Amino acid sequence: MLKVCNSQNVNTSSFWQGMKILFDVDLPNQIDKFDQLYSKISTFSPLSIPHFMASGSVDKDTPSSAYILAQFLSGTMVEPVSIDDEMVADLAEHISVLHHNQRATFGTVYSNGVTVSQWTNQLQDTLKILAGKQSDVISDTLLNDVLVESDRYKVDYFVPIMPDLRWDQFLQKEGKLSALVDLDAIVYGPRELELVLLEFLLDEQQAIIFLEKYQQTHSLPDLDKVRKSYRLLLFMMNVLGEKNIDAWMQAPTRF
């Protein structure tokens, strides 16, 4: 499977702008390091991860595109209408295992990362910059609220997370999740951010199943302390394409 990175699209994407500011992910210029990303996640996840074959970053001296070549895996892309209880449990197992792999720095999997003491400042800078680009949608009151909230919460450690987690990044076989095939945005970040995103992906019954599996090995953090901040961040990064800020911020809480 060959994927070519459109640098222009990445540079104008709200999602990748947020990933660069917050996690220092510069996709077109770092994709040549994806061998390390694929190798590490394949040792963590219970799901199949495509075998890495080759990749190349943008070359400023020659007209070339960033690309990644990885093994083609058989299976069917997961669609929301086909999700059953077993798939939700499989997702919970995958995320639970990744959340066991802690480190004291955040950022790309293939770097040493940034120390935990810098998380709040980096998060607040990202919120301010993205809000400035969407000032017609994000009110000063909302931004100030989340800045105050984020200043009160301290992160102890970071784990591999997918800030763009969606069902269509996985494959399934015979009703079970079988593989994760889109790893581009995996970074070390706070698990709370991924759990807040999951509240948008899971319905009430699915959330119960997810929590039952997840809490077999993890305690659930208090998302009330960070939910507003991380919801606003995810909205401004346009992770699921939502356009209505009020609907997004007032979505049901699951955890």
Image (cartoon, helix red, strand yellow):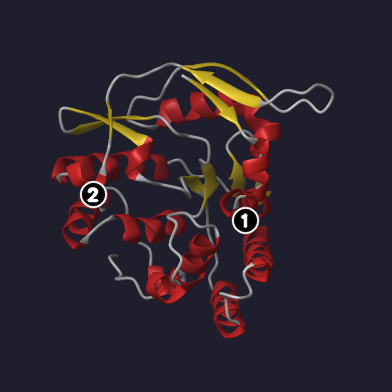
What is the residue that sits farthest to the bottom in this orientation?
A: 141
Q: Residue at x 47, y 54 (%)?
A: 239
Counting labels gives 2
Distance from disc 1 to disc 2, alpha carbons, whole Å, reads 27 Å
**Element at label 2:** loop
Q: Residue at x 64, y 64 (%)?
A: 130
What residue did someone put label 1 on? 116
Q: Position of residue 99 (x, y in %)?
A: 41, 45
Question: Which of the two residues, 80 or 93, is positioned nearer the viewer here?
Answer: 80
Going by the image, does 132 lie left or right of 69? right
10 Å neighbourhood of mark 1: few (<14), some, or many (≥20)?
Answer: some
Q: Position of residue 172 (x, y in %)?
A: 24, 30
Q: Is residue 97 visible?
A: no
Question: Which of the two residues, 97 or 187, is positioned nearer the viewer here?
Answer: 187
**Element at label 1:** helix
Q: Residue at x 52, y 36 (%)?
A: 184
Q: Is residue 196 above or below residue 109?
A: below
- The amino acid pointed to by label 2 is Gln
Question: Which of the two residues, 223 or 172, is positioned nearer the viewer here?
Answer: 172
- The amino acid pointed to by label 1 is Val
In primary-sequence order, the first of circles 1 and 2 is 1
Q: Residue at x 31, y 55 (%)?
A: 201
Q: Position of residue 75 (x, y in %)?
A: 27, 24
What residue did someone put label 2 on? 216
Going by the image, does 230 lie left or right of 144? left
Quarter of the image where one finds residue 135: bottom right
Q: Is residue 197 above or below residue 72?
A: below
Q: Is residue 21 above or below residue 183?
A: below
